[in-house]
Amino acid sequence: MKTLSKFILLALVLVIALPILAYRTGSPCEMLKKEWVERAQEKAEEVVEQGREAASDYGEQIERIAEQVGEIVENVTEDIAEGVAEMRVEEMSTGQCVKELLRIKTGREPTEGW
């Protein structure tokens, strides 16, 4: 019985500690905000990479321009995503943030558009 309770305690510590270490915050709403920003940034990077690949077909000068535009798009996307995430999180309770973060991490479809 002691072994089982030690295992349960260890599992609880890991469930609590791993997200805190990964997101560098103990607030579920801050974790959710960081997750949304990261996902938006990943989508922007995918689009930029597709643009770079398409530009490479037209030569080096176009490729450099695409690189510069890509950097701008990534920066703007991150700024916009941070603002939108901040606004959405402000309207949510801690419980709602936890629920949404779990939904994202388990890969279920969103209940609202993001």
Image (tube, rainbow, N blue to C red):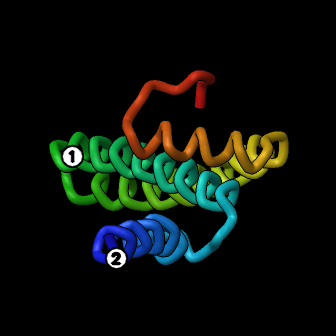
Q: Going by the image, does 74 lie left or right of 98?
A: left
Q: Going by the image, does 40 lie left or right of 8?
A: right
- Where is residue 58 shown, x and y percent of the image? 20, 44
Q: Farthest residue in the front direction? A: 1
| First-in-chain label (2 vs 1) | 2
Q: Which residue is mark 2?
A: 2
Q: Going by the image, does 82 lie left or right of 41?
A: right
Pointer 1: residues within 10 angstroms few (<14), some, or many (20+)? few
- Where is residue 93 shown, x and y percent of the image? 79, 44
Pointer 2: residues within 10 angstroms few (<14), some, or many (20+)? few
Front residue (pair 109, 66): 109
Q: Residue at x 46, y 74 (%)?
A: 13
Q: Is residue 29 above or below residue 58?
A: below
Q: Farthest residue in the left direction? A: 57
Q: Residue at x 33, y 61 (%)?
A: 64
The numbered dot on residue 53 is 1
Give the quadrant of the C terminus: top right
**Exactly how many numbered labels are in the figure?**
2
- Where is residue 99 shown, x and y percent of the image? 60, 40
Q: Going by the image, does 69 lie left or right of 80?
A: left
Q: Assign a secondary structure to mark 2.
A: helix
Q: Is residue 98 above or below residue 12?
A: above
For the residue marked with disc 2, what is the amino acid? Lys
